[in-house]
Image (spheres, grey):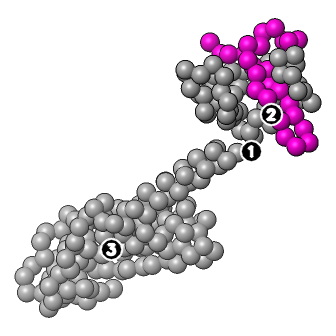
Amino acid sequence: MGPSGSGRGLLCRVCGGGPALDVTFRGHRGFVVLMQFVTRPGPYCRDCGLATFRATTADSLCRGWWSVLSLVVNPVTILSNLPARRRVAALPEPLPGAPIPPLDGGRPVLLRPSVLGVLLLILVPALVVVVLALTDPRSQPEHARAGDCVYDRNARPELVDDPHPDVKVVSCTDTRARSRVVARVTGTIDARAACAAHPDADGYFVAREDDTSYTLCLRTLN
């Protein structure tokens, strides 16, 4: 319980002014495998309460994500402060004559650099997904089988034959898909002869490596 004044009810624990409410703001910090819970009890006047809410929330947004459990605990902690924030925001302006000036609330939470913590939480997983998609070994042509779809990243509309193909396997629903693999023929040298047994093929991709070679007989997608 914070200080109280005779006949004036609760007084703010920070500035000693009033009116004040007995509310508590909580924060959270994650440290990879450890977590820290921060408790900032009142009473608070309107200005000191809002300042404490903003500072605690900003700290949680910046440092509250960095453990596995924190990804669940931190949002709950931040949301739990909203009712207390509404209560202190509804208080009238602190009465003059407090022992020390009330805290300066500063900028709203969403206008502080700490909000970048939330953006990082979104952007980092998205970046990981993109990197994994680009480096997925299953996208390499050596993993292609009949029925798979492919596209040539180096293809140009004006070229009939691409002298330097960079073929990737993609979903057949992908807008980049240009051809479907009709057949895969291993140990081939003559691609035309290899695909002659597949009359529905209108193209091919040949891969020649040190110890193996294969041909993908392709059918252009409409």
Name the quarter where the C terminus is drawn: top right
| The label number, if any, that marks residue 207 in the structure image | 2
Circle 1: element type: helix
Q: Whole-percent x and y of residue 18?
A: 16, 80
Q: Earlier in the sequence, mark 1 or mark 2?
A: 1
Q: Amino acid at mark 3?
A: Ala
Separation (CA) of disc 1 from disc 2: 16 Å
Q: Whole-percent x and y of residue 140?
A: 74, 39
Q: Amino acid at mark 1?
A: Pro
Residue 45 in view here: no
Is residue 170 left or right of 21 when viewed as pictured?
right
Q: Nearer the viewer, residue 84 or 163?
A: 163
Separation (CA) of disc 3 from disc 1: 46 Å
CB atoms of marks 3 and 1 within 8 Å: no
Give, as a single range, the part of the protein colored magenta: 195-222
Question: Marks 1 and 2: which is nearer the front?
Answer: 2
Q: Earlier in the sequence, mark 3 or mark 1?
A: 3
Residue position for label 3? 55
Q: Amino acid at mark 2?
A: Ala
CB atoms of marks 1 and 2 within 8 Å: no
Residue position for label 1? 137
Determine the image quadrant of residue 159.
Answer: top right
- Label 1 crowding class (10 Å Cα cut-off): few <14, some 14-19, many 20+? few
Is residue 122 left or right of 211 when viewed as pictured?
left
Residue 137 in view here: yes
Q: Residue 46, relative to residue 72: is it above or below?
A: below
